[in-house]
Amino acid sequence: METLIIIIFLVGYLAITLEHNLKIDKLIPALAMMAILWAVIALAHLPVFEVNAELKELEPTHLDEILLHHLGKTAEILVFLLGAMTIVEIIDYFDGFATIKGYIRTRSKRKLLWMFSILAFILSAIIDNLTATIVLVTILQKVIKDREARLWFAGLIIINANAGGAWSPIGDVTTTMLWIANKVSALSLIEHVLLPSIMCTLVPTFIASRSKVFSGQLESGMTDEDKPKSKYGPVMLYLGLGAIVFVPFFKTITHLPPYVGMMLSLAVVATFAEIYSSAKFSISSVDKEESDAHASHSPVHASLSKIELPSILFFLGILLAVAALESLGYLFHYAESLNEAIPNTDIVVLLLGAGSAVIDNVPLVAASMGMFSAELDNPLWHFIAYSAGTGGSMLIIGSAAGVVAMGMEKIDFFWYLRKIAWLALAGFLAGAVTFILLRDFVLNV
């Protein structure tokens, strides 16, 4: 029966990895895999267990209890992501991100590279690396007309957005998972991973800035028509970003789950959005005409309609699928075998980071949470957050930021592999070495 379970998981995983070849959205195999795994467990009456992190052992439990437990943990992540996505869409509703374009005045390619790198690093830590990449590539298309030069900028944005998301509890889905699961605390994560993430940004950006590609001036710059379309855009941008940043502080003060703080932040942002909008609040009325969206919808309603529900359903499927393997005790036993084969956990985590460049980092981190039973803020979790967050930059398909940039700019897989991958590898290794030195010789003192 164990062989059947593993085959189902591997087939589903392969279908997720080959979504572009199969032309099937990855949420479909993720949901199917999850449902079939739990169905097999129920029909075969397989014993299920709960991992006791303190005793580092498996405790028998009932199927209904363990499924409800995992559904609750998964729902915490999904509700949190829904809140964050809605706030970002509300900002976009008021064209708030156009405010960022106003800060771009230089035509020097080298200065622009550093500007976009810093923006990617900071924005991704607040609004997550996927959204930051979408925003910055959109701005890039307004600023740079030469497509070849734009591809290079997009490649560096991917690296820096992933680096920026790794050190923030709200910057990447994987770090959010670790944070909500009480594997890391916000302050400790920042303390351990911020400097390695900075190195992961500085090294490839510095190397790239010395190349001929980023020398010289741009032919054209920003125009007046790129200014915010709404006078409330800047206010909503700062309010929205501030509301998202507020969430970790709310959790620290109240000790409530992060999704509670995110819902409070969403309520505040939505209130101001309603005040600033001339539309009447009508959550029950749906107008399919996009041209009438601003006139007939509330900002909240319009923003909710734009949320990427396929991503939410994908996370639901993959997290509960991995939870099935964890409940059967497979991940626990695999972790023991892995520790015996490779006693050095640093090598294991580095391999995890390299693996995230090939396959999705969400199930990899979900599996690692079931494999290891280290306590809160153990350096192991911080290293996993760094490796899984930045390792995906080595291939363009290795991160959500890379995939969305690939779609927006039609970046060729092999072009990225030849031109950008080695820069991402240099940044990844520089950050990893920095993390190990920081952990062993500075924070361990």
Image: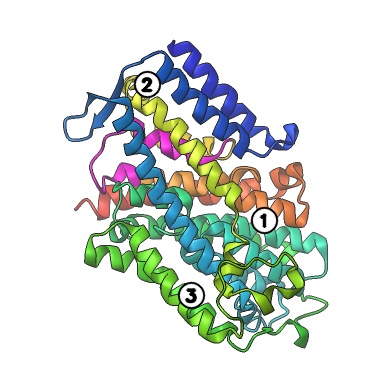
Q: Position of residue 300 (x, y in %)?
A: 55, 71
Earlier-in-chain disc, 2 versus 1: 1
Q: Residue at x 26, y 55 (%)?
A: 442
* Residue at disc 2, secondary structure: helix
Examine the rendered structure and indicate whether residue 323 appears above or below residue 415.
Answer: above
Is residue 229 visible to us here? yes
Instruction: Name the foreground residue: 73 vs 277.
Output: 277
Name the residue tied to disc 1. Answer: 155
What amino acid is at disc 3? Ala
Please, which residue is most extreme toward the left here?
55
- Residue 222, magenta (yes or no): no
How much space separates mark 2 and mark 1, taking CA atoms? 38 Å
Magenta span = 359-381
- Residue 378, magenta (yes or no): yes
Q: Residue at x 40, y 71 (%)?
A: 265
What amino acid is at disc 1? Gly
Name the residue tied to disc 2. Answer: 330
Q: Position of residue 237 (x, y in %)?
A: 53, 78
Q: Main secondary structure of the magenta part?
A: helix
What amino acid is at disc 2? Tyr
Name the residue tied to disc 3. Answer: 270
Task: Please state the total of marks drawn on the protein image.
Answer: 3
Between label 2 and label 1, give the one nearer the viewer: 2
Between label 3 and label 1, give the one nearer the viewer: 3
Quadrant the N terminus occupies: top left
Is residue 433 visible to us here? no
Between label 3 and label 2, give the one nearer the viewer: 3
